Amino acid sequence: MSKNTFSYCLLLLCVLWTLPALGSTSVTFPETWDVGQVFAAAISSHSTFEAPSIAWLERAVSLDVEPGREGHVAYALLGSHVRDVKPGLYPLEFSFTQDGERFVVKSTVRLKERKYSEEHLKVESKMVNPPKSETTRIQKEARLAAAARRTMTVKRLWTTPPERPVVGVVTSRYGFRRVYNGVPRNPHAGTDFRAPTGTPIKAPFAGKVVLTGFHYYSGGSVIIDSGNGVISLFFHMSEVSVKEGEEISKGQIVGKSGATGRVTGPHLHYALSLAGQYCDPEPLFSTSITQLLQNMKTTVIRGEERTP
């Protein structure tokens, strides 16, 4: 046997040693990730399984089982809101039923701090300190938006990478610390795109419209559920062209950009909520679920490791 052949066989042996056996079931997730950033997780098996879910940051995320990964797979997009979640170690729990038995797999993800910039904006004073006459309206709209973000459906309608909602450049990124008229406010929970009034807005994912309206702070608004806790939010629109309950396709026009609500000029504010956590949507426009899962930790739950 030549030296090159021997080296190849040794390498192949090392690879086979770490691969899950046929018929195994495994979970994949990151061991560490940045606060505010989207990450992927998955349950995969060569055999069928049912009722998969993931518990993350006090929310149960219902998943869909579909063909994939040489068998069956359930994908999830998760993350953490930079406003609410501090760096630290957080529990991540997978559960699923297979062969009549319920499995629960407990692990953790260490969230690391990420530095986000600060920006100072000038807006009408009533948008920083609204008149008391608007309090009831603002509170009602906040409840409606919060309920829409809590939507949790099983069927996965989202695919990656998502469609970019408009072609305009990003003018304000996720996580920016907003200072309105010298008054510090919460970090920016979405991404602002430059978009002159009347620019058509595309849906990044297929889904179902769960809320529309013209609100005090967010102006013309559309909220879309794409399954598994993946919720898209579009704000400051001049025109809304979809209705609540309507099923839409990826890339479909949902309205037109504008300058309604609390704004300094025409633009689109797009936000991505994952199981109730506002996350940075921008990196997702250039990646896929399979790319996100690369180089992540895989733990075999059922089935033995291959042996030489």
Image (spheres, helix red, strand yellow):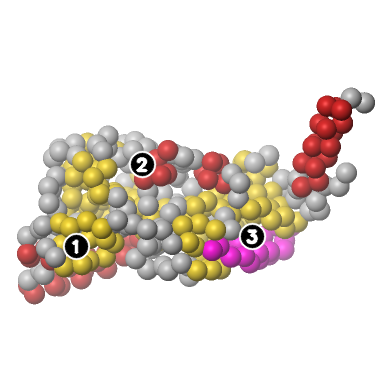
Of callouts 2 and 3, the N-terminal one:
3
Q: Amino acid at mark 2?
A: Pro
Q: Residue at x 20, y 71 (%)?
A: 139
Q: Amino acid at mark 3?
A: Phe
Between residues 173 and 127, which one lies in front from this camera angle?
173
Q: Secondary structure at mark 2?
A: loop
Q: Amino acid at mark 1?
A: Val
Of callouts 1 and 3, the N-terminal one:
3
Which residue is the site of mark 3?
96
Neighbourhood count class around disc 3 (C-alpha, 10 Å): few under 14, some 14–19, many 20 upward: some
The CA distance from mark 2 to mark 3 is 29 Å
Read off the magenta span.
92-110
From the viewer's perspective, tell me whether residue 76 is left or right of residue 83: right
Which residue is the site of mark 2?
204
**Does residue 60 appear anywhere in the picture?**
no
* Main secondary structure found in the magenta portion: strand
Q: Relative to residue 219, is residue 143 depicted above or below?
A: below
Q: Residue at x 19, y 39 (%)?
A: 195
From the viewer's perspective, tell me whether residue 37 is left or right of residue 199: right
